[in-house]
Amino acid sequence: MNSIRSFIAIPLSSEIAQAAAKMVNRLKESGDGIKWVPTDNLHLTLKFLGEVHNTEVPQVCEVVQKICRSIEPFELHFQGAGGLPALDRARVIHAGVVDESEFLTSMVSQLELQLAKLGFKPEVRDYRPHLTLGRAKARRANQEVIDRLQSEQSTVLGSMIVEEVQVIASFLDKHGPTYQIMDTIDLG
């Protein structure tokens, strides 16, 4: 039985992806100790599943379909830059996501609950919507990166309507991950 490293995500509109790529270009410097996400790989992660047996993929897709049917398309706003777990200890560099409708948070809660019934480990931390732009190679980002993040805290990237969710396979090689969409599910 083969397993597939998988996650569930919202694809970005081209406008948000381009604005995020421009933010990354302003933030990154050679030798800054951050592994920046390539523009083609930018997405809004809802749930990282880890290794999924290929026979379980249809069940995962069914769960996502059921949840997506109950949620109408909704708007997300992308603005600011920050770090997780906190700006001064940033291991993950991100753009902020504002979920005024709370549909995103509701969707993630439902995914956690329903996927736990299939045996997927629930996330121990509360979901904090964010668009990952990069990850520190060391324990945390250096002060120069943090200073650049602070200069982007009020930057507005734009808004998009979320209309679909994807179940994605991730394949790791020496150049980083490559993604293959296994299923695309419309909302509503």
Image: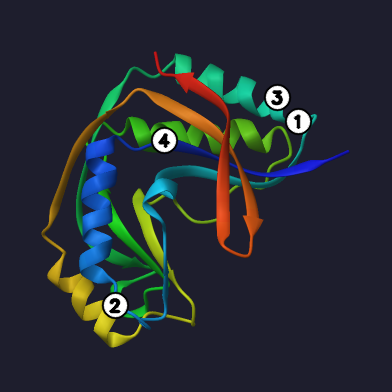
Q: Residue at x 28, y 37 (%)?
A: 14
Identify residue type, mark 3: Gln
Q: Marks 4 and 1, Cα distance to the nearest angstrom?
A: 21 Å
Residues 19 and 175: in front is 175
4 or 2: mark nearer the eye: 2
Left or right: 22, with 102 as reference point? left
Q: Locate the C terminus and report the quarter of the image it occupies.
A: top left
Q: Which residue is mark 1?
A: 56
- Residue at 76% of width from left, 30% of height from top? 56
- Tell me which label, 2 or 1, sits earlier in the chain: 2
Task: Measure how far apart labels 3 and 2 are at the Cα level.
Answer: 43 Å
Residue 105: image x %, image y %?
Answer: 38, 38
Q: Is residue 97 above or below residue 76?
A: below
- For the residue pair 77 and 115, the one nearer the viewer reads as 77
Q: Closer to the camera: disc 2 or disc 1?
A: 2
120 relative to 113 in the view: left or right: right
Q: Which secondary structure lies at badge 1?
A: loop
Give left or right: position of 62 versus 28.
Answer: right
The circle on residue 10 is: 4
